Amino acid sequence: MRNDLTEILYTEQQIAEMVAKLGEQITRDYKGKDLLVIAVLKGSNIFLADLIRKIDMPIEIDFIAVSSYGKSTKSSGVVKIIKDLDYSIEGKNVLIIEDIIDSGLTLHYLMDNFMTRNPESLEVCTLLDKPEKRVVDTKVKYSGFNIPDVFIVGYGLDYAEKYRNLPYVGVLDPKVYS
Ligand code: IMP
Ligand code: MG
């Protein structure tokens, strides 16, 4: 383990097992329907790549990029769309893919925004969730791991744009950001 991490929370193997489980659930639930998967950049990029290969049916993919923490580890509550979707979601079964839900502010904003575009259905899949940090209530249908209030990095998650390429999820040593 790197010396700027205090703990490995989930290994590559544990993540792969959870991703496969989520993929199976999604395949079962959407069988026979169309499905548009929307990844929230940049954090969910790696999760998306692994998850869609565990979804055993034809799907479409689109991306949206929103502003996040910058160099801080706390959500500002201000959400800005940096890159919008390429296509209309009207009449589509939409599944939002998130890396992690913390305060829920990002997701809450996105869901409100997407609902105005009249999708047929709108659900959320997140790999990681910090339920005790929730500020706004958000309906999450597919959720991988519940984690405590610690700042984590790896498997797509960053601190100041670094650590995204770690193949596991680890707890960042607070000395790095304090
Ligand atoms: P929320 O709006 O507070 O729910 O924050 C959601 C976004 O904050 C996620 O998509 C991540 O980009 C980022 N985030 C939240 N917690 C962490 C963490 O522990 N490590 C890295 N990024 C995080
Ligand atoms: Mg993110």
Image: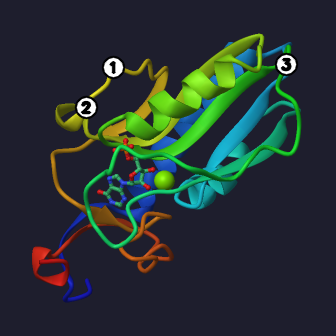
Q: How many marks?
A: 3
Identify the residue at image location x=25%, y=30%.
135
Q: Nearer the viewer, residue 142 or 105?
A: 105
Instruction: Say if 95 sits above or below 40 in the image.
Output: above
Label 3 belongs to which residue? 90
Cβ(mark 2) to ligand 1 < 8 Å?
no
- Circle 3 sits in a helix, a strand or a loop, which is it? loop
Can residue 25 be seen in this snapshot? Answer: no
- Does the CB distance between marks 1 and 3 fall below 8 Å? no
- Location of residue 113 in the rendering, given as x and y in whole percent from the top left corner: 62, 27
Cα distance between the residues tagged 3 and 2 = 29 Å
Residue 27, percent across and down?
A: 70, 25
Q: Which mark is residue 137?
A: 1
Residue 81 position (above or below residue 136): below
| Callout 3–callout 2 Cβ contact below 8 Å | no
x, y percentage for residue 74?
A: 25, 56
Q: What amino acid type should be assigned to the residue bearing mark 2?
A: Arg
What residue is at 17 percent from the left and 56 percent from the top? Answer: 150
Give the CA separation, mark 1 to mark 3: 24 Å
> Which of 103/147 is in front?
103
What mark, if any, has residue 75 been given in the picture? none
Circle 3 residues within 10 Å: few <14, some 14–19, many ≥20: some
Q: Is residue 111 above or below residue 133?
A: above
* Residue on which the image places disc 2: 134
The three-letter amino acid code for the residue at tag 1 is Asp
Secondary structure beneath dot 2 equals loop
Residue 56 appears left or right of 170: right
Q: Position of residue 69 (x, y in %)?
A: 38, 61
Packing grade of label 2 (10 A; few <14, some 14-19, many >=20) is some
- Element class at badge 1: loop
The quarter of the image holding the N terminus is bottom left
